[in-house]
Image (cartoon, rainbow, N blue to C red):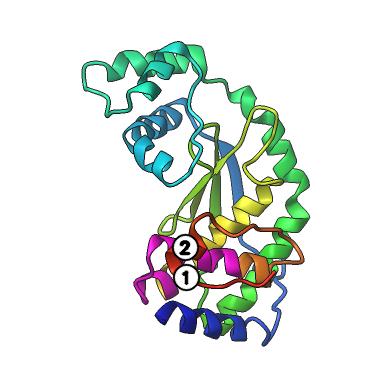
Amino acid sequence: MVFLCVAKLFFLSFFFCIHFLSASERPILIFRPQTPQEAFSYIEKLYPQLPWFKENGYQVALPEHPIFAILQQNPRALSDAERPELEELFVTEVYSASQYDCSLRNLKEWGPLITQGLEKLAALKENWGFNLMETYEVVLTLYGPGGDCDPQKGTVLLFTTPSGGFKRSAGYEVLLHEIVHIGIEEPIVRKYNLSYWETERLVDLICSQYLNDILFFPVTKHSKEEIGILTTS
């Protein structure tokens, strides 16, 4: 019931105004690939979580190197003894910064759509305190389930492929999805103590209903079953 009331209040607030940002007001987005050390640290954290990802229907990209494939078959936390050797193997035989070139070019081409989305989200900042940050650091990764964010730092982790592909049809969709996550964390998620699936459902509603002229978002998997909310098509 709390979730339903919160959602209704937010959608009423969408239509008060659209505040278009000047160039000086617009958030700064910094795009870069993970460093070798960041990438290894990230995949190290993924292995123990693989059972949870599998249970919840997530596909997780991991290094295809034979040694790492063995870890994937028997997911566990790395020991202190094996970590240095595996990190060196990853840095020397797996990681390549050039694998991110296509994705960075694509994101640059999507700049006008990203800007359009940020300008619409500015209305939510004006109307009910959506947290639109001054700077977002967008870090590209070849690993993981898709996207993630750090609401405190304004960092977005964005999954991509060496061919420039993303989990959704366009990377800017995932990016704006994660920016919405950051924007509602303090004023909504924590305030109303929303669950994981309630949060995902609310983010998808904002994206599919409010940003529908920019984005196309399917309903998050399990959201109907977990929350019991009917959706309109």
- Report the label total: 2
Q: Is residue 149 magenta?
A: no
Q: Answer yes or no: do the residues labelled 1 and 2 have beta carbons within 8 Å?
A: yes
Q: Secondary structure at mark 2?
A: helix
- Residue found at x 52% / y 79%: 7
CA gap, disc 1 and disc 2: 5 Å
Please tell me which residue is depicted at 41% across the width and 18% down the height of the picture: 68
> Neighbour class for label 2 at 10 Å: few (<14), some, many (≥20)?
few
Q: Position of residue 70 (x, y in %)?
A: 38, 16
Note whether residue 133 is visible.
no
Horizontal side of residue 201 vs 48, given as left or right: right
- Write the residue at 45% across / 30% down: 39
Q: Quadrant of the C terminus?
A: bottom right
- The quadrant holding residue 76 is top left
Where does residue 224 sit, x and y in percent of width and height? 51, 64
Q: Amino acid at mark 2?
A: Glu
- Provide residue 163's location: percent of width, then percent of height: 70, 28
Residue 225, label in figure: 2
Is residue 177 at least partly visible in the picture? yes
- Image quadrant where residue 215 sits: bottom right
Identify which amino acid the numbered label 1 is placed on: Gly
Q: Which dot marks residue 27?
A: none
Q: Residues within 10 Å of mark 1 (few under 14, many from 20)?
A: few
Query: What residue would you read off at disc 1?
Result: 228
Residue 119 lies, with reference to residue 3, above or below; the image says above
Q: Which residues are magenta?
A: 188-205
Q: Is residue 123 left or right of residue 179?
A: right
From the viewer's perspective, is residue 169 above or below residue 61?
below
